[in-house]
Image: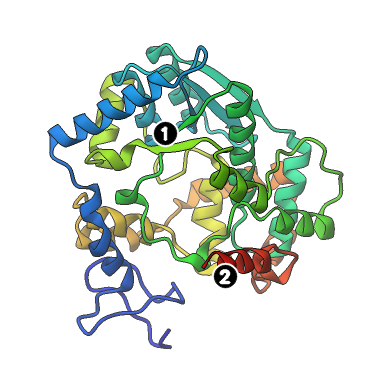
Amino acid sequence: MSNKYQVCTRCVMDTTDPDIHFDQQGVCNHCHYYDANYRKYIFTPEQAESNLNKWAATIKSEAKGKYDSIIGMSGGVDSSYICYLAKKMGLNPLCVHFDNGWNSKTAVSNIKKIVDSCGFDLETYVISWPEFKDLQRSYIKAGVIDIEMLTDHAIMATMFKLRKEFKLKYILSGTNFKTEHGMPESWIWRKQDLKNIKSIHRLFGTRKLKEFPTMGSLKFLMSLKLGWGGTYVELLNNINYNKEAAMETLKKEFGWEYYGGKHYESVFTKFYQAYILPTKFNVDKRKVHFSALIHNHEISREEALIELSQPIYEPIALINEKDFVLKKLGFTENEFDQLMKEAPKAHTYYGSDEKMIKFLKRIRG
């Protein structure tokens, strides 16, 4: 990365991504990655309908019990739209919500509206708050960037457990290329790194973990290779997915409500993305989200730049939500502010299974 600050001339990604690079026209590697891949996700209306019909027939034909699939629900737009599609496809999924103690009222309301309207069953997994609080405090004290890997790891482990319990092969995933591509590798960490979680908690935690759901990298990779983990079906990658259009459909069909930003359906995720990341790590994930929407022709570059010039947090909201989060996590403001000033640490600074993953990749070629 050059020492000179630079913004892509096509999207809004910039040199806060340490691995970004630009061509002679100032267009970044994320744009080139999009150009090389987006055609796989462009369909005519007839093709999109055919894709969904084929998946519906396949999933129904392999159902072994009451449910034919499983959906992880957050109350956000992507998972909510997956439920909408599942209903249209005539599927009967088991909806699963992972409650880590940070649900917003909007998220809870959205989930209830959609599940009730679709007539789907909902299984809510409530995590042990004392354990999860201890883990989040540990990660904040450790100074690593991906605090959210704790939630993602637990969701993955929980979904694996429930899928196995109910003998469900298909997981309907809200993952989609069009609105989620371009995340810099340095801004996240591998969610299955259980060794990293245990190492950081061992150093900074204060209580024993008894209920936190786990699933390490080796088991995860083996489950994918041998089919133990089921089959992930990315329905949004089988249609011409447009986030704005999806939100309008959800509002019309269910009275769904928007929560103000990507993943802001969680109180902690909002605070993490809108305060911790920019304050401690100089990372503004809005740049990734806006850039994906620029590529998907949902927002112009000029509109994105105007949005980025605005504060991520409204001042009053920041005061109130910071106070709420710190009290819930048991930090004093002085203690937390000092942690925000300390230099970030790489996840590999602590115990990690990164070497094992690199070795496995080498022997697999």
Residue in front for this viewpoint, 263 or 364: 364
- In the shown orientation, is residue 175 left or right of residue 268? left
Residue position for label 2:
362
Q: Quadrant of residue 16?
A: bottom left
Q: Secondary structure at mark 1?
A: helix
Assign the N terminus to one quadrant of the image. Answer: bottom left
Mark-to-mark CA distance, 2 and 1: 35 Å
At a point 73% along the width and 61% down the height, the residue shown is 141
Residue 12 visible in the snapshot: no
At a point 64% along the width and 27% down the height, the residue shown is 125
- In the shown orientation, is residue 241 left or right of residue 112? left
At a point 51% along the width and 64% down the height, the residue shown is 187
At a point 59% along the width and 50% down the height, the residue shown is 221
Question: Which badge, 2 or 1, is on the more N-terminal residue?
Answer: 1
- Residue 223: x %, y % from top left: 59, 43
The tag on residue 287 is: none
Residue 310 visible in the snapshot: yes
- Residue 215: x %, y % from top left: 68, 44
The three-letter code of the residue at mark 1 reads Ser
Residue position for label 1:
79
Q: Secondary structure at mark 2?
A: helix
